[in-house]
Image (cartoon, helix red, strand yellow):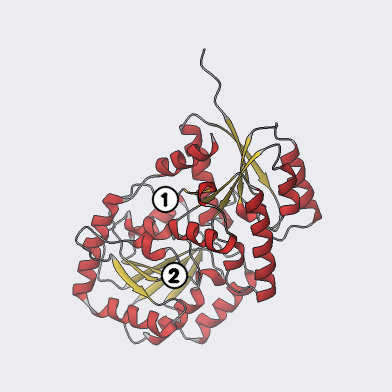
């Protein structure tokens, strides 16, 4: 008689399926839930609403109820955005449940935090991770960072990098159609990109900024003001979130992806671009260089520039826009890199080994 599949309880933010708040973390969570099911694992999704990682009393009580209802001995995969700020809620369940915490980005590494707030989040996260049975990082860089900051031992630290779906090749053009994809927040650095674009305003280009506008409304307002102040309103379009066919169409119309992030453990949009043969101009921050990688002949499928440096980003864009040979080489390298990318089924198998 075949044994029933193991059940994994997956605790995710309450906006898990809110397309207006689409983020790399939410996409990752959705895809691994589906991928775990495909491996034969029974998955019970447990969205918990709250302003994570700063929940109010109601959100904390809701998470407590969710964990208390999980049968003893079952595995629980907790998104770190929910779990890492509330060790006092999570740790009491460590003795009766197999708690596995998924860290997309260490909480203290979020851009724009005051030092005291970052230190408090880091301490909370450390307590949660040390209470867990296992910790899963979404990139080799993130695993190294977690080990360095939190001292999580190697035998409890695992990697399950994001996958990417196969996609048709983007036709590519003259290199002037720039695309930036990511939640509009300080961490993603759209303000740095706008300032860099102002420095190359004498060249021909257009830029689309794609991503949710609701995660940091004050930043979005300031970004709109900055675009207007720099006189770029007719060339920089802030178009909100795109998913599914609409996002596919947006990528198909792009010549290059620009990623100006201040922090990025992996950079899922990098592999989304490479899957379409689109080169990338990116800040060489955290895990991005590993994600971008190289073609078999050693060429980089784009350009890496120093992070947080407006002048360097502008210089990279100027080089991209002015050098047809560079564009051709980068496009060839991107088309070669797309053959080496793993799908989401690999991510799911990596997680299943930890959970089941």
Any part of residue 233 in sight: no
**Viewer-closest of 260 and 99:** 99
Q: Examine the rendered structure and indicate whether residue 167 appears above or below residue 8.
A: below
Badge 2 element: loop
The x, y position of residue 15, in whole percent, is: 63, 51
Q: Which residue is mark 1?
A: 245
Name the one closer to the observer, 87 or 161: 87
The part of the image, by quadrant, that contains residue 96 is: top right
Q: Residue at x 50, y 68 (%)?
A: 263
Question: Relative to 137, is 208 on the left or the right?
Answer: left
What residue occupies the far top of the structure in this picture? 1
Nearer to us: label 2 or label 1: 2
Quadrant of residue 139 within the rendered picture: bottom left
Position in image of residue 5 (x %, y %):
54, 25
Q: Which residue is mark 2?
A: 285
Percent position (x, y) of residue 314?
A: 38, 82
Please tell me which residue lies in front, 282 or 107.
107
Q: Residues within 10 Å of mark 2 (few under 14, many from 20)?
A: many
Whether 267 is drawn above or below 44: the answer is below
């Amino acid at each position: 008689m075949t044994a029933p599949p193991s059940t994994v309880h997956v605790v995710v933010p309450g906006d898990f399926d809110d397309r207006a708040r689409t983020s790399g973390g939410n996409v990752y969570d959705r895809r691994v839930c589906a991928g775990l099911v495909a491996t034969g694992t029974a998955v019970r999704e447990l969205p918990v609403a709250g302003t994570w990682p700063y929940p109010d009393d109601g959100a904390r009580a809701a998470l407590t109820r969710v964990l208390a209802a999980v049968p003893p001995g079952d595995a629980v995969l907790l998104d770190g955005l929910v779990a890492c700020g509330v060790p006092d809620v999570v740790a009491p369940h460590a003795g009766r449940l197999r708690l596995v915490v998924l860290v997309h980005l260490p909480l203290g590494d979020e851009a724009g935090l005051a030092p005291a707030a970052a230190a408090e989040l880091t301490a909370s996260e450390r307590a949660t991770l040390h209470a867990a049975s296992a910790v899963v990082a979404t990139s080799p860089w993130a695993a190294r960072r977690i080990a360095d900051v939190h001292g999580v031992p190697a035998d409890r630290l695992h990697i399950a990098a994001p996958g990417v779906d196969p996609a048709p090749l983007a036709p590519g053009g003259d290199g002037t159609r720039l695309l930036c994809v990511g939640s509009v927040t300080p961490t993603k650095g759209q303000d740095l990109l706008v300032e860099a674009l102002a420095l190359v305003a004498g060249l021909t280009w257009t830029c689309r900024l794609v991503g949710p506008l609701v995660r940091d409304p004050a930043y979005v307002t300031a970004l709109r003001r900055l675009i207007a102040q720099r006189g770029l309103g007719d060339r920089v379009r802030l178009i909100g979130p795109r998913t599914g066919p609409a996002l596919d169409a947006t990528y198909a119309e792009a010549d290059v992806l620009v990623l100006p992030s201040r922090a990025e453990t992996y950079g899922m949009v990098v592999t989304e671009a490479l899957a379409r043969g689109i080169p990338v101009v990116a800040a060489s921050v955290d895990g991005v260089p590993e994600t971008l990688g190289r073609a078999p002949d050693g060429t980089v499928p784009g350009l890496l520039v120093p992070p947080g440096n407006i002048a360097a980003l502008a210089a990279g864009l100027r080089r991209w826009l002015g050098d047809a040979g560079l564009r051709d080489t980068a496009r060839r390298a991107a088309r070669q890199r797309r053959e080496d990318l793993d799908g989401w089924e690999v991510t799911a198998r990596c997680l299943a080994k930890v959970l089941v």
